[in-house]
Image (cartoon, grey):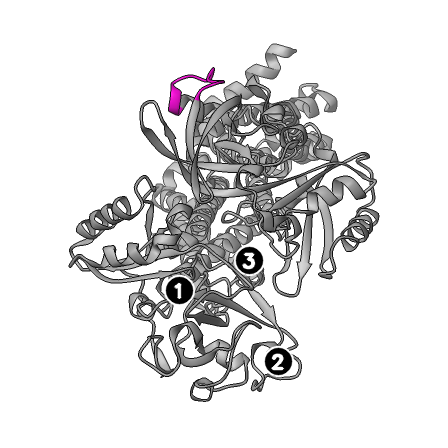
Amino acid sequence: MLPNTLKIPLRRIQRRPLYALLNVAGLALGMAVCLLIGLYLYGELRVDRFHEKSDRIVQVGVETDLFGRGLSTSYPLAEVLKQNVPAVQRAVHTRPRPSRAVRNPTSDFEKSRRILTASPGFFELFTFPALHGDPSEALAQTNALVLTASTADTFFGQTAVVGRSLTVDLADSSRTLTVRAVVQDPPESSTLQFDAVAPIRLTERSSWSDGWGMFMFETYALLNDPDVDHASLTDQIQRAVDQHSDRGFEYFSMDFASVYLSPLHQADGFRGQARYLYIFGAVALFVLLIAAINYVNLATAEGARRAREVGLRKTLGAGRGRLIGQFLGESTLLSVAALLLALALAAGLLPTFNHLFGTHLSLTSGPTGLALLGLSVVVLGVGAAAGAYPAFMLSRYDPMQILRRQSPTSAGRDGWLRRGLVVAQFAISTALIVSTIILYQQLQYVQHKDLGFDGERVVTVEIPDDAQGARRELAREARAHPAIRRVSVTNGVPMKQDIRLGLSPNTLSPEHDAPAKDSTIQFAPAVIDSHYVEALGLRLVAGRDIDGARSVPPERAVLLNETGARRMGWTPDEAVGKPFSFGDQSRTVVGVVGDYHIGSLHNAVEPVALFGTKSDRWSAAYVLTARLAPNKLQNGLDHLDQAFNTVAPGASFEYSFLDDTFDQAYRAERRLGSIFAIFAALAILIACMGLFGLAAHAADRRTREIGIRKALGATASQIVGLVSKEFAALVGGALVLGAPIAYVGMHYWLQDFAYRIDVGALPFVLTATGALLIAGLTVSVHAFRAARTDPATTLRDE
């Protein structure tokens, strides 16, 4: 029995290899895509859940009128949580630092590394296994440092480096610290990424102890019980803070592992955004559905061809149970072959997948057993569905009826099920293609939209903490070269202007004319000098620039952008001369610049206030911004590097071009466009494979009909039209169904952009033309072959 079960399908594969290839390859592609997307979704859902105490770790945030809702908190919060909140067992705070220079004093080898400062207890909350030393005790010591394995290897060539020393730039000075422990590198599934951890007390300032309004830290708490109600915990936190601070801020808590997929997380492109999990998951299921439909369609079409075989086998004594087992076994055997091919395809496509998604996944990085179990269920389900028609329908008929029905000249018709499945396939493919075109159009739009400033050849260099005091000298030194056209020192460079202050219009200016509904207006402040406007190529629409030769000195002068003036109820001309401040010293608006983008086009232009000096209400590090001369970029960069070495010896020189920074902001959209294009290509490929097989079946089934028509004078073009028109109608119906789905989906996706295209007819026209052309070419291969066949060949037995 077993040999027969295997021999019959193998013989059929030998007789009809194209049918087997289309069936197995289409289903394998769908399962491979589903497996890869499944690995990605699993990785996203497991971020920050690898910590042993992840179910008991919460992150505390604060909501204020100035900054809104966020996860940056004040320094004294951790101690208050630890001492005054019964539900909290331990609390720590961290302060992520930008990349800082780290140097081996023995060899003078220097590299920039990410330094995280943390309070004692950090390694008790979070699981970063120790390789050498005790990291928990290290953070309680003075002048201690904890390295990751890769950092230790970079600076010392090994990981057993406890007791060795490194010089690290921290705050406003360099400190020589002793390595007290080495831990494993944070995995990709960790939002806490660092190369070294230093005690936070090394950068501690006296003003932090009561700095409830200084939001520069991230605060985490370890709960006694993982089942603590967050509403109750938030109430406990609020009461504890109110006993120590009268600032009136509102606090909240959330599970640390849930922060990654929350709106409060600073997402890297589409990673860390919950909605993209649904999008990719749906697309993967759609591709698998197309493949399954393709498989079922071809299998049922092939099953219909075997009606005479069923009749003959029943006449020769085959029982219905044996026929059912045979058909289901054959179908499942092909499904298993598709599963094995899918695993091979997934392994081969994984490097490309990782490049597109920006991941480092492997087939062993997720729940492989669970994935295989799921795919096995799919295999069995698809195999059963595909074999069900011949197994249960044909096997129940009387053999005489089956043999009579299969007249050699019968044209036959595809059943409604097969037609519906073809429409579903192409409807999904249509939706993916339309979505890809609209996504590409939006990406082209944001990349070419006028940003309101000239970022070409503008380089920005972050000034290290220990060189902040010498920033004016640094600017003077930078200007002393013909390759440098303009130099400005500011803390408000576009794409790096992160501070937002929300104040009432009355606080901003007693002469405001803002609508009564605007109880708070949020401005993005920045400190600029008299070279800022020219360095960025901003456009003055009213008034003048900030300079020192006027009645209003630079330290009291303010520039607003058009949106800022409008929110205050002023036209640009009316704004000039108005008082404006953030509640500190008296200032005056001296000019209004044209609107320009300080962030990506996901957000609308914001009100901007440019001050001659820093306000007491906010602070930010300064950045040197320089416009380089054409054709002298390298000369200019070399001079800037030399200026940094002259003014701030030992300071790291790390630069970026402003236009590149904006371009990188849409890296995720470009990657998303590539992903959708690949998904759409796979979907249309699988659908066309199915259409190719069905067209072959239709042409083969109607061979004698075509022979009779040719014998009666039908032309080749008429024959091609006969075979093609039914498939053209199905594809046309799919376009009608798929286009509205794509329109609605992309309409919601475009809402994420403050500036977006209007969806016109072009994506739908291109998709309809392309789908019909591809489908037509696919079907025409068999139609032309049938039309060119000599009718004498097909009718010789009639």
How many other residues sit within 10 Å of disc 1, few (<14), some (14-19) or many (≥20)? Answer: some
Residue that badge 1 annotates: 445
Frontmost residue, 237 versus 392: 237
Query: Magenta segment range?
Result: 154-164
Does residue 416 belong to the magenta stretch? no
- Mark linked to residue 738: 3
Q: Of residues 195 and 767, which is closer to you in this image?
A: 195
Instruction: List x then y, in percent, for residue 33.
Output: 52, 36
* Amino acid type, mark 2: Asn
Relative to 431, does residue 60 appear above or below in the rendering?
above
Image quarter for residue 770? Answer: bottom left
x and y percentages locating residue 136 in the rendered image = 63, 25
Comes first in the chain, label 2 or label 3: 2
Q: What residue type is labelled 1?
A: Tyr
For residue 420, say whether it is visible: no
**Is residue 631 something that shows in the picture?**
yes
Tell me which label, 1 or 2, sits earlier in the chain: 1
User: Where is mark 2, residue-wise?
Assistant: 506
User: Callout 3: helix, strand or loop?
Assistant: helix
